[in-house]
Image (spheres, rainbow, N blue to C red):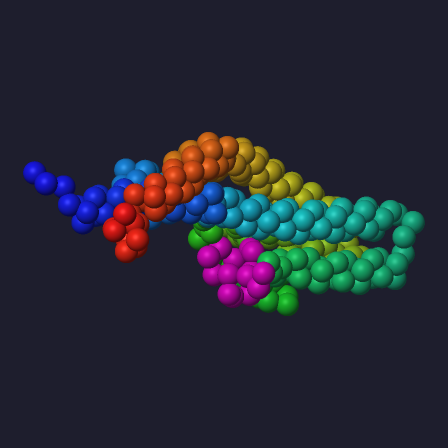
Amino acid sequence: MRITQGMMSSSMMRGLQANYSRMNKYQEQALTERRINRPSDDAVGIASALRYRGELGMTEQFEQNVEDADSWMKFSDTMMSEAVKILHTVSEKAVQGTTESINPEARKILGKEIDELYKQLVAIGNSQFKGKYIFNGQMTDQKPFSDDPANTPFTLDDGKMRYQIGAGIYADVNSLGKDVFGTYQDPADPTKTTNVFKALDNLKNALNSDTTAGIEKGITEIQTNMDRIIYAQADVGARQNRLSFTASRLEDLNLNYVDLQSKVEDINVPTTITELKTAEGIYQLSLDTMARIIRPSLMDFLR
């Protein structure tokens, strides 16, 4: 078969184009620092990369949920600590009220002080975190307590606020108002219920009426309610510990997925630079060779 000038030119052009494409591929990889820039670069690799990206996105969302849940719990714990401090102060004032040397007027002054502490406790019960009431279950848009919950009936929602912190794993972030502030069975009368607000109100009334027996009963009720809040705090602490372990595990997973994704998508910089320099050299050599072989000038033809 006779090899024509046109056939030689076409063959060299195909070779030149192939060398250019190879050089361009390494230039793009060096520029983006990624081995896979489009699905055609590696069909199997892109499937793995997309899977790792999906897993990484989910893990990052779980990490954010853990952070949000922990913030909610920390705020709840702080509010309960404030409530315990108030009850400690109330208990101290109640003990002062049982002193035999104290007169009725002094007890009334203590009653007024406890009334102010009562208002502070109600404010804690109506605490909001990021615009949401933290002690009313899932009804976070509704104020759980009135200004005088000791004498006004209230109904608290007992729904759990749950954040997803893993595949099929959820964490309860809220503490129920009924567990922190009441309502629970009255030890003195099992047919009735009571709560921390009633305990403070009863104590205030006992001080105002100068009733020592009522004051002593109030001290016991305050201690009972303080224990309930401390127990609720311990529950928050246990849930925070679980979140801490989960956060550590998610961080490890995140690093693992980043590493796997990098192995699939990213380049080895020294290797890619070497390949690029080699491809550039081959392409330049192809140009020089083609220029020497194909000289479409009249003088070369006549020669």
Q: Looking at the image, which is closer to me, 95 or 32?
A: 32
- Residue 1 on the magenta segment: no
The structure residue drawn at horizontal position 75% and vertical position 58%, both measured from the top left corner, is 117
The structure residue drawn at horizontal position 76% and vertical position 62%, both measured from the top left corner, is 116
220 on left or right of 35: right
Q: Is residue 142 above or below residue 192?
A: below
Give the percent coordinates (x, y) of residue 11. 22, 43
For the record, the magenta segment spans 130-143
Q: Looking at the image, which is closer to me, 142 or 41?
A: 41
Q: Main secondary structure of the magenta part?
A: loop
How many numbered marks, from 0 up?
A: 0
Q: Looking at the image, which is closer to me, 12 or 176?
A: 12
The structure residue drawn at horizontal position 85% and vertical position 61%, both measured from the top left corner, is 109
Q: Looking at the image, which is closer to me, 275 or 100?
A: 275
287 on left or right of 240: left
Give the percent coordinates (x, y) of residue 48. 33, 38
213 on left or right of 242: right
